[in-house]
Image (spheres, helix red, strand yellow):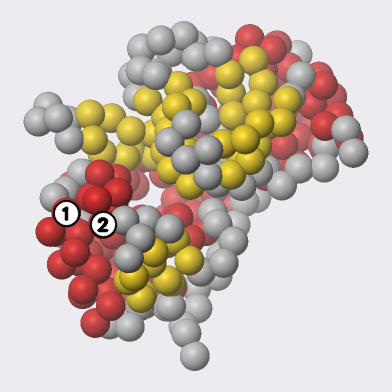
Amino acid sequence: MSLAAGNFANHLLAMSRACKGDELFANLETVDLPLGMLLNEPNRTIPHIYFPESGIGSMITSLSDGRDIEIGLFGADGMSHVGAVLGDELSPYRTVVQVAGKGNRIAADRFRRAIEGNSDLMRLFLKYARSFSIQTGSTALANGRSTIEARLARWLLMMHDRISGEYLGVTHEFLATMLGVRRPSVTDALHILEGEHLVISRRSEIVIRDRHGLAAIADGAYGLAEREAERLTGWRGKPLFRSV
């Protein structure tokens, strides 16, 4: 099936079918998204916009002490460099693939032409931009007021929403980088979640057992952005569940 036919696992591209996004589809190319792939560098013109079909991308900034921290993530629900929707060719952040997958990409200038010439398409992507801004706002709130275990629970739920299955291939070191904390703090937080039987932590792998319990630990840090994403774009994460 050709890309122009619009059969996509990516939610935004799938929704673009109803907007008659033929110009968008015609300029897409399929790509692999290997772990660690750099999708854009900070303060450099961004050549391509990526739409994951699988895998997850992470928007990261560097702190003054040299540590990194994640400020936003996206998978098949969204796209890289949401600023392109607003005509911005640069980003102060870098974006990397944190879970390998596949997807499609389009040259940034062709993306702009496609949405500027289609008001329905522009409206769809503006709604996603709004949704993503709410996600980053929720991240800022969590970073400012939540405990490390609450932030970790939120992050695990967000990742789990965007993958198939219950297994997350992540290390403690990686989690520490994403949360902007030291590795021992992540290890302690994982022990708390394991003690509540919410996850199983193995070497380089975390198994999600109880989403409902993780949401309770997240203490309000998870849920608002997800409800707004569903309201604005129709995208829905996984339901809350308890293991049996």
| C-beta proximity under 8 Å, tags 2 and 1 | yes
In the image, residue 228 sits, relative to residue 80, either above or below, namely: below
> How many badges with numbers are in the image?
2
Give the residue displayed 62% in from the left and 35% down from the top. 32
Q: Residues within 10 Å of mark 1 (few under 14, many from 20)?
A: some
Give the residue displayed 44% in from the left and 50% down from the top. 225
Give the mark nearest the N terminus, 2 or 1: 2
Give the residue displayed 48% in from the left and 66% down from the top. 167
Q: Amino acid at mark 1?
A: Arg
In the image, residue 198 sits, relative to residue 156, either above or below, namely: below
Residue 150 rendering spot, x and y as whole percentages: 25, 63
Task: Indicate left or right for 53 with 178 as reference.
Answer: right
Question: Residue 113, located in which quarter of the rendered image?
Answer: top right
Of residues 236 and 171, the one nearer the viewer is 171
Residue 25 rendering spot, x and y as whole percentages: 79, 26
Q: Which mark is residue 183?
A: 1
Give the secondary structure at mark 1. Answer: helix
Residue 118 visible in the current orientation: no
Q: Amino acid at mark 2?
A: His
Of residues 120 and 1, the one nearer the viewer is 1
Residue 173 visible in the current orientation: yes
Give the secondary structure at mark 2. Answer: helix
Of residues 11 and 31, the one nearer the viewer is 31
Q: Residues within 10 Å of mark 2 (few under 14, many from 20)?
A: many
Q: Which mark is residue 127?
A: none
Residue 90 rendering spot, x and y as whole percentages: 43, 13
Which residue is disc 2 drawn over? 172
Assign the N terminus to one quadrant of the image. top right
- What is the residue that sits farthest to the left in this orientation? 65
Residue 92 rendering spot, x and y as whole percentages: 33, 19
